[in-house]
Image (spheres, helix red, strand yellow):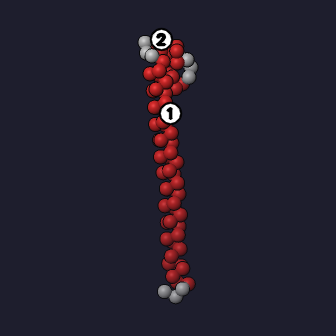
């Protein structure tokens, strides 16, 4: 979490926690990838929910369309 906050350098954190800087960089990349995936899911979910609303609105129009067509 400290590395993601970017208040300290990777080198400082590696020294503080007795880790190799590469490990911290790896964790940062993994966190970024997971965040991107999560963001895409949220955006995708929003788009899907928008389509559901559109479909519901269209479904409400069906009785009126059928009525106008005499069915």
| Residue visible at 50% across and 39% down in the picture | 36
Residue 12 point in image, percent of width and height? 52, 13
Residue 57 vertical position relative to residue 10 in the rendered view, above or below: below
Looking at the image, the residue that sits furthest to the left is 18
Residue 64 point in image, percent of width and height? 53, 79
Residue placed most toward the observer, 3 or 50: 3
Q: Could you classify mark 1 by the number of other residues whose Cα lies within 10 Å: few (under 14), some (14-19), or many (20 or more)?
A: few
| Residue visible at 49% across and 56% down in the picture | 48
Residue 3 point in image, percent of width and height? 51, 22
**Which label was assigned to residue 4?**
none
Secondary structure of the residue carrying numbered label 1:
helix
> Which residue is labeled 1 in the image?
32
Secondary structure of the residue carrying numbered label 2:
helix
Residue 2 vertical position relative to residue 59 in the rendered view, above or below: above
> Which residue is labeled 2 in the image?
15
Are the residues at dot 1 and dot 2 in contact (C-beta closer than 8 Å)? Answer: no
Residue 38 vertical position relative to residue 19 in the rendered view, above or below: below
Looking at the image, the residue that sits furthest to the bottom is 70
């Amino acid at each position: 979490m400290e590395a993601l906050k970017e208040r300290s350098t990777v080198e400082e954190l590696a020294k503080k926690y007795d880790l190799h800087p590469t490990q911290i960089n790896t964790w940062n990349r993994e966190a970024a990838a997971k965040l991107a995936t999560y963001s895409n899911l949220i955006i995708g979910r929003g788009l899907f929910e928008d389509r559901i609303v559109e479909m519901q609105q269209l479904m409400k129009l069906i009785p009126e369309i059928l009525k106008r067509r005499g069915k």
